[in-house]
Image: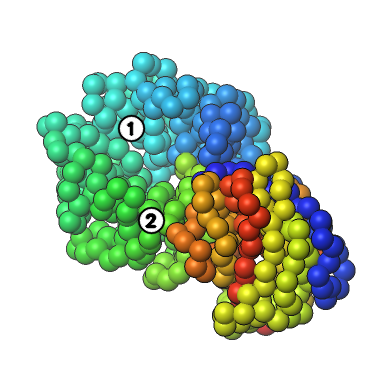
Amino acid sequence: MRGRPFLTLPIAGLVAACGGGTGSNPIGGAEVPPQLLACRARVDQPFQFAEIALRDERNLGTRRVGERSGQERHARLHPDGNTVVFARERDPDDPGSREIFVSTLDGSRGEVRLTQNTGLDDEPCWSPDGSLILFTSDRSGTAALWQMAADGGTPVAFAAPLTGGADGEADWHRGSDRIVWSRADASGRRTLWQTTGNAAALLPLTDGGAAIGAGFGDRSPAFTPDGAAVVFVRRLAPGTSVLARAELSTGAVTVLLAPAGEVDTPRVAPAADQVWFGLSEPGAGRSAFRLASMPIAGGTPTAAWPDERWTLNGLDLLPTMPAAPTAAAPTQLDVGQAQVQIASASSVFGARSQLTAEDGQEYALTTTTIDGREIAAINVRFDLPVTAATDVLELRVRLLARASRIDGDSVLRSSIYNPVDERFDTAVELEPSGINLQTLAFRTSSLRHVTKEKQLRLTVVADLAPGARANLLIDLVEVVLVAKAAN
């Protein structure tokens, strides 16, 4: 990912104009009640730009937990619904500098640091009544589970790891007092184990599957609301993992999602209808861990955060998160009725009709030179056929485009306009494998990228290395809308 910002440049004027208005006002505001809290950091500058963001399930809101210097990770919400415990990496790229802190969502109490030592303190979670914090620490020389009072104090060892192994990533179920965590053996291969709050019996839950080697196997477990199962990550190979579910009564494992990439930090929604997680699929041009969700029974994930700038480092869901609304049948929007504007080009060949079907009929733009690079781009604005902007549940975007040359540092990119932050956020960025058509596709549920006037704006960009003029050729701009079902 190159992370080069894209600016809309109206060089060649309008190609066609359809659809009403030019409004770009955001939905909602800063005081949208939060339904999740997520630790995130900028991909390019993770230490300088990191926060615990407070959002609703549709990516609205601008609040965050007050922070100081460092990268916040693994935030978890107290049973009181206001206090947050998290780890902060105080020195750049130094996991050993992580310490445990607490703060509040409403700012009613100042931030307090609970641990201070020369080793790692990380991955905290609350006991069912909120009186204790269970966390990972290597203060004894190896990573293990430790416990301390909610207001700090002297930590005590919770359970001893396997000989030569390590423990971490614990989750503590509020209703059953059960604890599940990831345990490494002497080879570093990981499985899930379970116990209760008094650590009276430590029992294996999963076998790690076919994964072999240090760091691979079963990671990041999280209970379902009823405590009958956990969702977790099974890491199979470098850059490859699946999202799975294990039943506590039998240990039976079901794979929920096998992406072309990795998953991280799963959490099950309070209504037990969805699972939320970080998703990274670099091969599809969607790198970094972006916040996504999908039905708990499995299905196609949808990005709540489509923006490539941020990576997810921790997640918790508030009890106020509602069940997913009923969806109407998907509707494909007519690009023939969209407004198409040239953002950057020295010349243009074709008509909007060439964007409507995957038929080899290509809309062509010749690049122009900007900051020494060869750039061609269009904006496409759709009017969304919904009664209210908040009726939009999901947008499924698929674009087919290619560049006539790809030598050097060249990318194809699709961005989506964000009226809250008044910028285009990159949803897909691909390094083309050739001059053949490339698919740029993503799904998003983010209302941060839909305007109050019920409009969506997309870009298709060729950002090519310096050199001769080249063409951006676009065969298809497809947007499918999923809206709330009528009452």
Badge 1: residue crowd in 10 Å (few <14, some 14–19, many ≥20): many
Residue beneath the point at 76% across and 63% down: 347
- The one of 167 and 468 positioned closer to us in this rendering: 468
**Cα distance, mark 2 to mark 1?**
27 Å
Quadrant position of residue 277 = bottom left
Residue beneath the point at 69% across and 64% down: 365
The disc at residue 412 is none
Judging from the image, what secondary structure is the residue with disc 1 in?
A: strand
Which residue is tagged 1? Answer: 136
Judging from the image, what secondary structure is the residue with disc 2 in?
A: loop
- The one of 234 and 8 positioned closer to us in this rendering: 8
Quadrant position of residue 148 = top left
- What x and y, as percent, mark residue 399? 58, 69
For residue 164, above or below residue 339? above
Q: Left or right: where does residue 161 sit relative to residue 175?
A: left
Can I make out residue 248 in this image?
Answer: yes
Residue beneath the point at 76% across and 79% down: 337
Question: Where the C terminus falls, by quadrant?
Answer: bottom right
Q: Left or right: where does residue 115 sit relative to residue 167?
A: right
Can I make out residue 317 in this image?
Answer: no
- What x and y, as percent, mark residue 186? 13, 36
For residue 389, above or below residue 207? below
Residue beneath the point at 63% across and 32% down: 66
Q: Left or right: where does residue 290 sit relative to residue 467?
A: left
- The one of 203 and 263 positioned closer to us in this rendering: 263
- What x and y, as percent, mark residue 187? 14, 38
For the residues labelled 2 and 1, say whether their Cβ atoms are less than 8 Å apart. Answer: no
Name, please, the residue furthest toward the front: 468
Which residue is tagged 2? Answer: 261
Q: Mark 1 belongs to which amino acid?
A: Thr
Q: Mark 2 belongs to which amino acid?
A: Gly
